[in-house]
Image (spheres, rainbow, N blue to C red):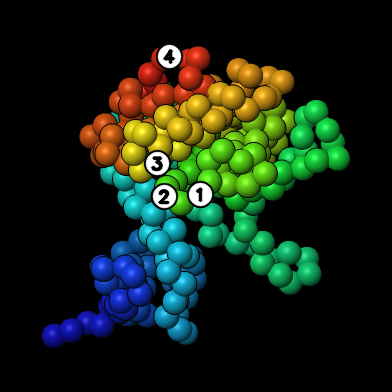
């Protein structure tokens, strides 16, 4: 007997079918978690999304979340929370703003500002100490060498964000933990592209050059459930020859 808990659709240019909860499924999940359906932030889809790029991005973020959650299950590290880029909040004008979208002024010129929405924000805890992370899943489509757009513009946001200390806004989202700094984790498609990113970031002028060392990169092939917290991460500053692990 079919319980009709799931529905599926096949988006264009994506070979896999995508499944999502129907109302019966949402009721079962809520019952198992002993919460109301409203607490799941679930809603019935009125139409099937058609935007191929949006869906690919959405799937990539959720694949990362599954990877991270699975890695935490076999690690001493505990996931305190995960906020994906598509979470929104209502503004006083009744509009919806992405919750983790933020802006920061250039530390060298207050007339210049950078706005960005990370792919995700999450926090990990080990032995009572917590650490804040931003995630960027690079699909190999954005330009790397232009600071006015694409990847380097994203990097400029993080460099100034780190210097400004505005990231402390997330302390209330993750149990009131104190974050003295953060790490940005970049997962890209190949080692060659990662090296191209590192070269571009290293050449980019920034008054506090050590700030580049908190942005870490690796490849999809290296970032697995078994290796995610291992020393697979390298700084995007090529002068930093260390290989880092998380935790």
Q: Secondary structure at mark 1?
A: loop
Pointer 2 residue = 139
Q: Do the CB atoms of the residues marked 4 and 3 lie less than 8 Å apart?
A: no
Distance of label 1 from label 3 (alpha carbons): 11 Å
Q: Secondary structure at mark 2?
A: loop
Question: Is residue 187 at least partly visible in the picture?
Answer: yes
| Label 1: how many Cα within 10 Å (few below 14, some 14–19, many 20+) | few
Q: Does 105 appear above or below 94?
A: above
State which mark lies toward you, 1 or 4.
Answer: 1
Among numbered discs 1 and 3, the one appearing first in the sequence: 1
| Residue drawn at x 37%, y 23% as measured from the top left | 245
User: 93 or 134: nearer the eye?
Assistant: 134
Among numbered discs 2 and 3, the one appearing first in the sequence: 2
Can you tell which mark lies on residue 241? Answer: 4
Distance of label 2 from label 1 (alpha carbons): 8 Å
Residue 13 falls in image quadrant: bottom left
Q: Secondary structure at mark 3?
A: strand
Q: Do the CB atoms of the residues marked 1 and 3 lie less than 8 Å apart?
A: no
Pointer 1 residue = 142
Q: Do the CB atoms of the residues marked 1 and 4 lie less than 8 Å apart?
A: no
| Residue drawn at x 50%, y 14% as measured from the top left | 239
Q: Do the CB atoms of the residues marked 4 and 2 lie less than 8 Å apart?
A: no
Among numbered discs 4 and 3, the one appearing first in the sequence: 3
Pointer 3 residue = 188
Among numbered discs 1 and 4, the one appearing first in the sequence: 1
| Residue drawn at x 77%, y 42% as measured from the top left | 113
Q: What x and y, as percent, mark residue 156?
A: 65, 36
């Amino acid at each position: 007997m079919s319980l009709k808990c799931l529905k599926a659709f096949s988006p264009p240019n994506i070979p896999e079918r995508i499944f999502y909860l129907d109302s019966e499924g949402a009721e079962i999940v809520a019952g198992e978690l002993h919460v109301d359906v409203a607490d799941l932030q679930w809603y019935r889809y009125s139409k099937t999304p058609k935007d191929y790029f949006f869906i690919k991005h959405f799937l990539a973020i959720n694949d990362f979340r599954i990877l991270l959650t699975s890695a935490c299950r076999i690690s001493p590290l505990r996931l305190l929370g995960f906020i994906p880029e598509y979470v929104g909040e209502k503004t006083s004008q009744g509009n919806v703003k992405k919750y983790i979208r933020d802006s920061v002024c250039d530390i060298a010129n207050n007339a210049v500002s950078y706005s960005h929405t990370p792919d995700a924000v999450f926090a990990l805890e080990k032995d009572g100490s917590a650490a804040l992370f931003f995630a960027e899943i690079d699909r190999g489509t954005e330009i790397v060498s232009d600071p006015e757009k694409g990847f380097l513009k994203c990097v400029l946001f993080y460099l100034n964000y780190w210097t400004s200390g505005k990231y402390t806004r997330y302390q209330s989202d993750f149990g009131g933990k104190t974050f003295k700094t953060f790490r940005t984790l970049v997962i890209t498609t190949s080692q060659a592209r990662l090296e191209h990113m590192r070269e571009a970031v290293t050449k980019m002028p920034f008054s506090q050059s050590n700030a580049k060392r908190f942005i870490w990169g690796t490849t999809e092939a290296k970032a697995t459930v078994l290796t995610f917290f291992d020393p697979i991460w390298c700084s995007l500053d090529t002068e930093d020859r260390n290989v880092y692990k998380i935790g």
